[in-house]
Image (cartoon, rainbow, N blue to C red):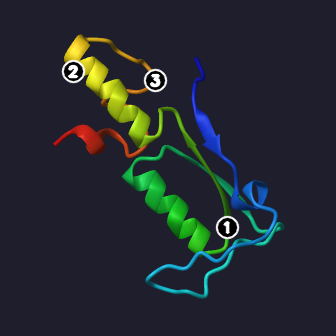
Amino acid sequence: VKPGRCVPVASERASEPRSLATPDSAADTMPAPDAPHVVVIGAGPCGLFAALELCRAGVRVTLCERGKPVEERGRSIGALVRRGMVDPESNFCYGEGGAGTWSD
């Protein structure tokens, strides 16, 4: 069982910088290789927003999340609700989107 996953900084995922076009500004670009580097723990609402804002500010960001991506997390939660099978790394509390993703 993998205890979590880290999403590498963009420059480590792609050899060529890509545009981060957003509704706010189409002029945003990938952070420079020598830009400050921050690790954000948790892909809940606050972690995702912090990572987004840091990227927009030109900071290199690594986003770490203990649980599974939201698509896989849906299957884990389905198994929990229907069959009572608990995945300790992907449930109502852990996974992409945070606890609020499945609370309503």
In the drawing, what numbered circle is on residue 81? 2
Q: In terms of image quadrants, where is residue 99?
A: top left
Which type of secondary structure does the marked residue at label 3 adopt? Answer: loop
Residue at the image point whose x is 60% and y is 36% from the top: 5
Which type of secondary structure does the marked residue at label 2 adopt? Answer: helix
In the drawing, what numbered circle is on residue 14? none
Disc 1: which residue: 59
Residue at the image point whose x is 77% and y is 68% from the top: 35
Disc 3: which residue: 89
Q: Nearer the viewer, mark 1 or mark 2?
A: 2
Q: Earlier in the sequence, mark 3 or mark 2?
A: 2
CA–CA distance in space, label 1 to label 3:
29 Å
Which type of secondary structure does the marked residue at label 1 adopt? Answer: loop
In the rendered image, the vertical position of residue 3 relative to residue 95, given as above or below: above
Q: Nearer the viewer, mark 1 or mark 3?
A: 3
Counting from the top left corner in percent of width and height, residue 11 is at: 76, 61
In the rendered image, the vertical position of residue 72 relative to residue 24, given as above or below: above
Residue at the image point whose x is 38% and y is 46% from the top: 97
Counting from the top left corner in percent of width and height, residue 6 is at: 63, 41
Q: Earlier in the sequence, mark 1 or mark 2?
A: 1
Type of the residue with mark 2: Val
Type of the residue with mark 3: Glu
